Structure formats: structure tokens, C-alpha cells
């Protein structure tokens, strides 16, 4: 493929999104979100008052969480630097549009040359950081034309990624002009170097730095301790209806064995809450109700988390953790519970997540296919002797430390660009 063919394809792709917006909700959301982009960019240009920006681009919310530690590091050392944070996905933009450490939060326009040139003229970056692997080739080519230092971090390149194939020559040539590519794992670094990208460097995963910081300062919640009592606690994070079916089938046995459940659905909707409440009936209480009660009924064995943003601190109370999403597109965040050194379980769709693959291979995570697997996982946590628990914690901690420190590596590489 050549850059000319790519430009033709990307022009067609973005115009097709706009053409389909009346009939496809996702395309409509993408298009509607960008209707006011010209005014937003004009506002950025006016408010930066001639100063250049640090442009940090995230595809979506997951990439933002990887970029967040670097943003925090920059702002802590250089509070006067102006950060322009962009998103490709509406989900990332809508949730983080008011992120307090970004001076400007905008949509990425499209990778059509005229639009990206207009975008760069308005935000005028002196440094650009891409999180993970959102490769936009026209954008990268123009950044190089303008001699703007450009970095990728928390990048991961899997074995069959198209960038490693023979037909990706034009893309490789562009990536050779990138200032540096910091990878999440050593395998990604080796794959990039094999195809001639000598500026690749293993740094680790910036998300690990953040979750370790959160775990180092656990938030004690008396109401949670009141609910937990002396029972064993399994926390189910970011669960979907497919995960709930397994939980429903496991509940009676688990209660008889002294377990309580804390469930934080991925879809924080009243509809989903009502479904769970109907299924568990008198066994369930919402967190919002728990806060207001001085006494919890002995028959209440399930706590429904109905508040966004607290799950990552609740893992402190877990004896075991189940992560949702493994029966759909893929599992959710496993690093948060691992930072508290908790044993994990999740569904079978986990192969695209290196930290999950590592956890399964090293036997501190179990793959769940059905309720029988779930019950076996829970029973195993009750019978493991303390010495084995300590060994598991030691292995988890070793893996986390091995892949930590990326934030500092990235910061040291870019700090010379700050005033």
C-alpha cells in the first residue's frame, strides 16, 4: 500500500461515516460531536494566546487511562504548559471533556490532509504524544513536515499486527520519522525493531504506575466493612448480562459457603439495576442505600455498586475478583485488582490483553466458562493455605513492578521540550 492509496481510502472512510450518520447511531454520534469543532478550535487558538501546546491524543477512554499518568506528571512539573487533549471516540470525549488537567479537550477531526492541517494550525503543538497505537498516517506525515517531535507510549504490537507485514512499507517509513516509540512489553519492542524501527524502546505500561499509586493509598470505607463482616468477599467488576447469568447460577451455593458479592455492572443504568434487584430479591442492597443505613440485614449477601468511579478502590476488600466482559468483546481492567494483589477470574475472551495472558500463564488468574468454573475458583480461594497466598501475591507484585515505571521513562524523554 502507498500513502496515495491510504489517502484515497481514508477520504472514503470518513465521508462514508458522515453519509451513514442518519441511519447508524455510532456514525451519527461521531458526526454530531464534530459539528462544533471549528468553533472549539477557534477558542483554543484564542485562549492559548500565542503559546504552543502539548498535544496528547487518545483514541478512547481506555487510552486516556494510559495517558493520564503522563499528563499528571507533566502538569505537576510544568503547570504552565498548555495541554490539548484530543479523542477520536465520542465515549472518551463525552466522559473526559471536562478533565481538569487538560487546558483544552477536543475531538480529533479526521485524517484527511486539509482537516488535519487546519487542526494543527489552530492548536499549534510543539510536542505531540500518541497513546498506544492510534496510527493516523497523514497526521504523522504532516507532523514530520512541520518538524514537531512526536512520541508513542504504552504502545503494543501483537504478533499479527499489519504493521509487521510486507505491504506496510509506507507506514514503516513514516514511523521511522517518529521521535520514539515506547512499548508496553518487550515483545512489541522486538517486533518493531525487526521491521527496522530502531527508535522503539521497552518502557512498560503507564496504567500500572497509576493503579499502584491508588493501591498504595487504600480508601477505607466503614459502610463497606459493615457489609463485609467476617464473610469471604468476591468483587465482580464491569460485568455484563452474560456475566450476570453465571453469577445468578452461583449465588445459592456461594451464600451457603459464607461468601458475599459486590457487583459493579459496566452499564450503570436503572434498567440494569432493576434486573439485578429482581433476580436477587431480598439478598441485594444498593450502595446508595447502604450508606444511609446503620444496620444491614443478615440476609443481604449482594452489594450493588450504583456509583461511578469507586470500583478501583473497592478491590482492597476482595478475597477474590471476577472481571466482566470476557463473554463479549473482551475483558475489562484487570490491573486495578492486581494492584491490590488479588487472585483473578474472567471469561474466555482475554487473549488480546497481555497482562491477562501473563496472569493465566502464571496461574494467578482463572478462565471461567460456566458456573461450575466460578464455584471452583471461589472454593479454591477458601482452601488455599496462607503460604500459597503469599507466593501468589509475590508473583503478582513481581510482574507489576517489572512493567512499572513507564511514566518516568516517558517524562524523562520529553522533558527537554518544555519551557
Image (spheres, grey):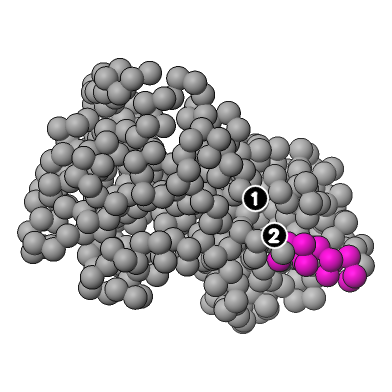
Q: Which residue is mark 2?
A: 399
Residue 162 visible in rendering: yes
Helix, strand or loop at disc 2?
A: helix
**Closer to the camera in the image, 282 or 188:** 188
User: Can you say whether 383 is above or below 271 in the image?
Assistant: below
* Mark 2 nearby-residue class (10 Å; few <14, some 14–19, many ≥20): some
Q: Which residue is mark 1?
A: 355
Instruction: Give the magenta part as a residue range.
Output: 386-397
User: Can you say whether 225 is above or below 245 in the image?
Assistant: below
Q: On the picture, is 230 further left or further right than 172?
A: right
Image quarter in which the N terminus is found: top left
Circle nearer the viewer, 1 or 2? 2
* Mark 1 nearby-residue class (10 Å; few <14, some 14–19, many ≥20): many
Residue 345 visible in rendering: no
x 77%, y 66%: residue = 393
C-beta proximity under 8 Å, tags 1 and 2: yes
Q: Position of residue 355 (x, y in %)?
A: 65, 50
x 29%, y 73%: residue = 78
Q: Position of residue 394 (x, y in %)?
A: 78, 67
Q: Position of residue 138 (x, y in %)?
A: 27, 33
Q: On the picture, is 79 further left or further right than 43?
A: right
Magenta stretch secondary structure, dominant: helix
Amino acid at each position: 500500500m502507498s500513502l496515495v492509496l491510504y489517502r484515497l481510502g481514508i477520504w472514503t472512510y470518513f465521508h462514508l461515516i458522515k453519509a451513514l450518520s442518519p441511519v447508524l447511531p455510532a456514525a451519527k454520534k461521531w458526526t454530531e460531536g464534530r459539528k462544533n469543532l471549528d468553533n472549539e478550535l477557534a477558542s483554543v487558538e484564542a485562549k492559548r494566546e500565542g503559546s504552543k501546546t502539548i498535544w496528547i491524543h487518545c483514541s478512547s477512554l481506555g487510552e486516556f487511562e494510559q495517558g493520564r499518568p503522563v499528563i499528571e506528571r507533566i502538569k505537576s512539573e510544568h503547570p504552565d504548559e498548555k495541554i490539548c487533549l484530543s479523542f477520536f471516540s465520542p465515549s472518551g470525549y463525552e466522559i473526559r471533556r471536562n478533565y481538569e488537567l487538560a487546558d483544552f479537550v477536543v475531538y480529533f477531526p479526521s485524517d484527511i490532509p486539509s482537516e488535519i492541517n487546519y487542526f494543527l494550525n489552530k492548536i499549534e503543538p510543539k510536542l505531540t504524544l500518541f497513546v498506544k497505537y492510534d496510527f493516523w498516517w497523514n497526521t504523522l506525515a504532516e507532523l514530520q513536515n512541520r518538524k514537531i517531535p512526536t512520541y508513542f507510549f504504552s504502545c503494543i504490537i501483537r504478533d499479527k499486527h499489519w504493521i509487521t507485514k510486507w505491504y506496510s512499507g509506507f507506514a514503516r517509513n513514516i514511523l521511522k520519522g517518529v521521535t520514539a516509540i515506547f512499548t508496553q512489553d518487550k515483545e512489541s519492542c522486538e517486533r518493531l525493531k525487526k521491521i527496522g524501527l530502531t527508535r522503539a524502546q521497552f518502557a512498560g505500561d503507564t496504567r500500572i504506575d497509576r493503579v499502584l499509586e491508588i493501591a498504595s493509598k487504600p480508601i477505607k470505607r466503614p459502610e463497606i466493612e459493615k457489609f463485609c463482616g467476617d464473610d469471604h468477599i468476591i468483587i465482580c467488576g464491569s460485568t455484563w448480562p452474560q456475566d450476570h447469568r453465571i453469577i445468578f447460577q452461583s449465588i445459592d451455593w456461594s451464600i451457603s459457603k459464607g461468601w458475599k458479592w459486590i457487583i459493579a455492572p459496566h452499564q450503570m443504568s436503572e434498567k440494569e439495576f432493576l434486573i439485578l434487584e429482581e433476580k436477587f430479591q431480598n439478598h441485594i442492597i444498593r450502595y446508595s442505600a447502604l450508606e444511609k443505613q446503620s444496620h444491614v440485614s443478615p440476609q443481604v449477601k449482594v452489594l450493588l455498586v450504583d456509583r461511578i468511579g469507586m470500583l478501583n478502590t473497592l478491590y482492597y476488600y476482595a478475597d477474590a475478583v471476577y472481571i466482566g466482559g470476557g463473554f463479549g468483546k473482551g475483558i475489562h481492567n484487570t490491573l486495578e485488582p492486581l494492584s491490590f494483589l488479588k487472585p483473578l477470574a474472567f471469561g474466555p475472551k482475554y487473549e488480546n490483553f497481555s497482562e491477562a495472558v501473563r496472569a493465566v500463564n502464571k496461574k494467578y488468574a482463572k478462565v471461567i466458562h460456566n458456573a461450575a468454573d466460578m464455584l471452583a475458583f471461589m472454593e479454591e480461594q477458601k482452601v488455599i493455605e496462607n503460604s500459597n497466598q503469599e507466593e501468589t501475591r509475590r508473583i503478582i507484585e513481581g510482574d507489576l513492578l517489572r512493567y512499572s515505571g513507564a511514566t518516568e521513562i516517558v517524562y524523562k524523554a520529553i522533558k527537554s521540550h518544555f519551557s
